[in-house]
Amino acid sequence: MQGLLFAILLLCCFIASQADPIFDVLKYGASGNGQTDDSQAFVKAWKDVCEARNGYPTLLVPKGRTFLLQPTAFQGPCNSPSVNFKVQGTLIAPKSVNVWKWPSSDKGAWLQFSYIKQLVLDGEGLFDGQGAPWWDCFKKSQCHDRPRALSFHACEGLKINKVNVIDTPGGHISLNGCNGSIVSDINLLAPKDSPNTDGLGVSGSSNVTIRDSTMRVGDDCVVINGGSNMNISRIFCGPGHGISIGSLGIGGTYGAVEEIYVGNCTFIGSSNGARIKTWEGGYGYVRKVTFEDIVVQDVQSPLLIDQHYSSYHATADNQKAVKISDITYRNFRGTSASEDAVKLMCDKNVGCTNLVLDNIKITSSDPKMKTKATCSNAHGSNSASNIPQVSCLVKFLL
């Protein structure tokens, strides 16, 4: 009998040792009063999370508390195969531009996560970038380089689920080199006139899923600046600048995007819907992209290709351009705030090839106005039932 009890005790001790460890930032000295700088408490907690070897280590930001953080970097690699950054409370950035304290010369983001495999960010909490002073500074022709709220670099297998990010100085969330990422059920919010407050930006990443999220921002809701094999679905965008590929090719640079699916998305009151934008003089390609089952309501430019996005950084070699091909627009319906429901403005030298427009039904928000399509050097096919008719498409490939 005593032997049995001893065995049970050993088993209980073993199970306890294997339990998922939780590292509560309050136990590392965080005050959670919204006024005291809690950055070092988070750094200490993260160190223990990243060094933990057993279970599924979690950095916990408890609910009911507000934590003030200066710009902070959370670095990997970590010992555990997967780690959790669980935000149930509120994280706030410094309120004034001049009180931000940067730990290094990298001033790109408020909170940076790097080289962490299988990182899970969740918890239904709030990240508040307190961006209004930065926007005011920018409007005075200062503060041109404003930090993003959350930056993820080389975080393979990243999962971001049920987080809220508001009022960021610059973009809300950026993913770079984060292959195999899943972003779901996030809410991003900033005023319509907040400058360059992109929702979610992706670059240098493949096999990325973005779904079931709401983005009301001052710039692109989702922007893809490089990568492949992405699925973007059930996104609500507005206000904002739509879901954009690019801009690519700035300053004569190379850009590449392929195998992108955007489906079951809704745009209300946004400046754009489905947009591809490239700079003159750049090179590379955008290919094998599908926009499907899209609802637009009072959108300024529902369907747009712009290969002359800006000439400000154009190079002297205007014979080059990012090649756009194999783009499908299918099952669009709703209303346009302008008469230009479809604009396909392609480069004069390389053009756009194999564009497919099928079952487009976009009428005007104004009953007295009709929508129209405008094309330049665009080649592809146009369904006879499309509204507006895209008869400006050249019906053969270059």
Image (cartoon, rainbow, N blue to C red):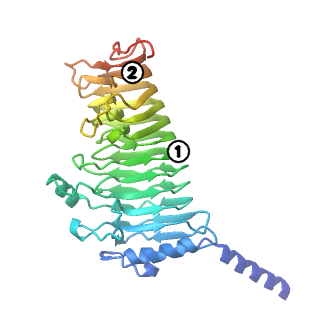
Q: Which residue is mark 2?
A: 360
Q: Secondary structure at mark 1?
A: strand
Tell me which amino acid carries mark 1.
Answer: Ser
Please, is residue 144 above or below residue 226 in the view?
below
**Picture quarter with the C terminus:** top left
Q: CA distance from mark 2 to mark 1?
A: 29 Å
Residue 144 percent coordinates (x, y): 23, 54
Q: Nearer the viewer, mark 2 or mark 1?
A: 1
Please, is residue 356 above or below residue 220 in the view?
above
Please, is residue 20 above or below residue 191 in the view?
below
Q: Is residue 156 left or right of residue 88?
A: right
Kindly identify which numbered label has been placed on residue 206.
Answer: 1
- Foreground residue among 186 and 317: 317
- Foreground residue among 374 and 203: 203
Residue at the spot 26% in from the left edge and 31% down from the top edge: 300
Residue 184 percent coordinates (x, y): 47, 49
Residue 120 percent coordinates (x, y): 52, 59
Q: Secondary structure at mark 2?
A: strand
First in sequence, mark 2 or 1: give its number.
1
